């Protein structure tokens, strides 16, 4: 499961937040019930684009402090 500070990628677009499929963000808070995460999405300069609550099933894990970089299926993006 995901943890705070994990780097994640959206599996599907979030049009209401103007986030495309494949947007990358960092988990800043974990919600237990229901399983969801507050994710900060940033641009290449580190500026915050959006801060959204996201369900686990809509995220792919890219990097974690426990394992480092995680191999993600190239077709998932």
Image (cartoon, grey):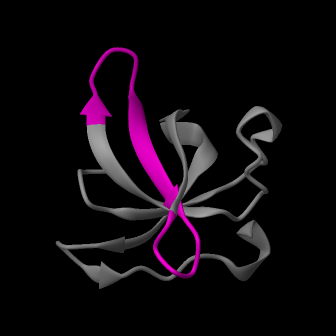
| Residue 14 screen position, x and y as percent | 75, 41
Q: Is residue 2 left or right of residue 49?
A: left
Magenta residues, start to end: 30-47
Residue displayed at 44% across by 51% down: 40
Quarter occupied by the C terminus: bottom right
Quarter holding residue 74: bottom right
Residue displayed at 57% across by 40% down: 57
Quarter holding residue 68: bottom left
Vertical position of residue 49 compared to residue 31: above or below: below
Residue displayed at 27% across by 23% down: 32
Q: Is residue 44 magenta?
A: yes
| Residue 39 screen position, x and y as percent | 44, 46
Q: Nearer the viewer, residue 52 or 74?
A: 52
Residue furthest to the left in view is 66
| Residue 76 screen position, x and y as percent | 73, 67
Vertical position of residue 7 compared to residue 37: above or below: below
Residue furthest to the top in view is 33
Q: Is residue 1 visible?
A: no
| Residue 21 screen position, x and y as percent | 77, 57
Q: Is residue 25 left or right of residue 35?
A: right
Residue displayed at 27% across by 35% down: 30
């Amino acid at each position: 499961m995901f943890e705070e500070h994990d780097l994640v990628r959206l599996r599907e677009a979030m049009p209401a937040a103007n986030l495309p499929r494949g947007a990358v963000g960092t988990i800043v808070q974990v919600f237990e019930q229901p399983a969801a995460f507050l994710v900060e999405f940033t641009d290449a300069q580190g500026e915050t684009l959006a801060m959204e609550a996201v369900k686990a099933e809509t995220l792919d894990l890219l990097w974690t402090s426990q394992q480092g970089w995680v191999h993600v299926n190239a077709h998932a993006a």
